[in-house]
């Protein structure tokens, strides 16, 4: 028969597991693009978050008293990584080609170096763009699809050509129910001043597709949870990601890139964010160059 001490320890472990599950469920609903820890921005920037605006967990189960604040959250361990890719969504009706995009200024996310918003006139909505992120963890080739999100692709290519992503790090990693790596914050330099809320100084319009699914191989934009609040932060899904279709999907990750992401995930999380489920990669992932195919 269990002793009182054993019952207390078992109850404490159960509570900790419940809290982690609530945080993960909340996080899956809000991957906020700016990705800050604890209530600032996830996705990731947002979900990341360390999650931005995670909101309530929606758990109707009565909560027990939380553990003392001095108790550090357990570091999540990587879950099973699926090997099957998630198919890219398709638009039920093709967008006008060319189309027009708007990139209003965002004074709340002024970047550390000058950037210029792309020209939103005569933006193509057909064709693909090949980009390779050269990183300290290995090359991550991606393919951008203008038919999915022409305004997002136009902005992403513009930032890449301006050198915006070079020398930035990927500041958020999820290894359990939200298996993704979030990158693109110009303020995330791996020091105490990085908070995951940076952007390019302008915003990108939402280009959601009803019924879109997120999973292995999907490339999507993070946001703050507000309409048309995308910027420079994006997340690369290497595994499971049960998210609502509220993050613009604008491309896919190559097999080579997925192998790199798998290794980053297996290395694990170093510092855990306030959401208790995502955090900084244990091994820093830094973009040393970004090559855009002509």
Image: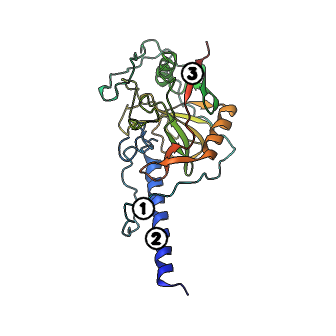
The answer to whether marks 2 and 3 mark residues whose Cβ atoms lie closer than 8 Å is no
**Residue 213 showing in the rendered view:** no
Give the alpha-carbon distance from disc 1 to disc 2, as whole Å: 11 Å
Is 90 left, or right, of 107 in this rendering? right
Q: Residues within 10 Å of mark 3 (few under 14, many from 20)?
A: many
| Picture quadrant where residue 118 is located | top left
**Labels 1, 2: front one:** 1
Q: Secondary structure at mark 1?
A: loop
How many discs appear?
3
Q: Which mark is residue 71?
A: 1
Q: Residue furthest left?
A: 107
Q: Which mark is residue 41?
A: none
**Labels 1, 3: front one:** 1
Mark found first going from the N terminus, 1 or 3:
1
Q: Residue 75 in the image: x percent, y percent?
A: 52, 54
Q: Which mark is residue 290?
A: 3
- The residue that label 2 is drawn on is 12
Q: Secondary structure at mark 3?
A: strand
């Amino acid at each position: 028969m269990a002793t009182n001490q054993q019952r207390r320890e078992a109850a404490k472990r159960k509570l900790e597991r419940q809290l982690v599950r609530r945080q993960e469920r909340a996080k899956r609903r809000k991957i906020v693009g700016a990705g800050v820890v604890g209530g600032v921005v996830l996705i990731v920037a947002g979900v990341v978050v360390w999650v931005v605006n995670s909101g309530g967990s929606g758990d109707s189960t009565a909560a027990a008293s939380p553990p003392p604040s001095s108790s550090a959250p357990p570091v999540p361990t990587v879950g099973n990584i699926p090997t099957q890719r998630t198919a890219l969504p398709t638009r039920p009706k093709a967008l006008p080609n060319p189309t027009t995009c708007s990139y209003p200024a965002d004074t709340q996310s002024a970047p550390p170096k000058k950037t210029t918003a792309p020209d939103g006139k005569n933006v193509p909505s057909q064709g693909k763009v090949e980009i390779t992120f050269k990183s300290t963890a290995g090359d991550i080739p991606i393919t951008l699809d203008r038919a999915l999100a022409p305004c997002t692709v136009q902005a992403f290519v513009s930032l890449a050509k301006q050198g915006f992503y070079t020398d930035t790090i990927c500041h958020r990693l999820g290894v359990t129910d939200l298996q993704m790596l979030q990158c693109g914050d110009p303020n995330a330099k791996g020091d105490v001043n990085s908070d995951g809320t940076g952007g390019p100084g302008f915003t990108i319009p939402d280009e959601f597709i009803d019924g879109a699914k997120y999973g292995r191989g999907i490339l999507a934009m993070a946001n703050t949870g507000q309409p048309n609040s995308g910027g420079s932060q994006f997340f690369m899904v290497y595994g499971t990601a049960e998210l609502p279709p509220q993050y613009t999907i604008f491309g896919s990750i190559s097999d080579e890139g997925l192998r790199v992401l798998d290794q980053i995930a297996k290395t694990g999380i170093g510092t855990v964010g306030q959401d208790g489920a995502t955090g900084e990669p244990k091994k820093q992932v830094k973009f040393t160059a970004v090559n855009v195919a002509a």
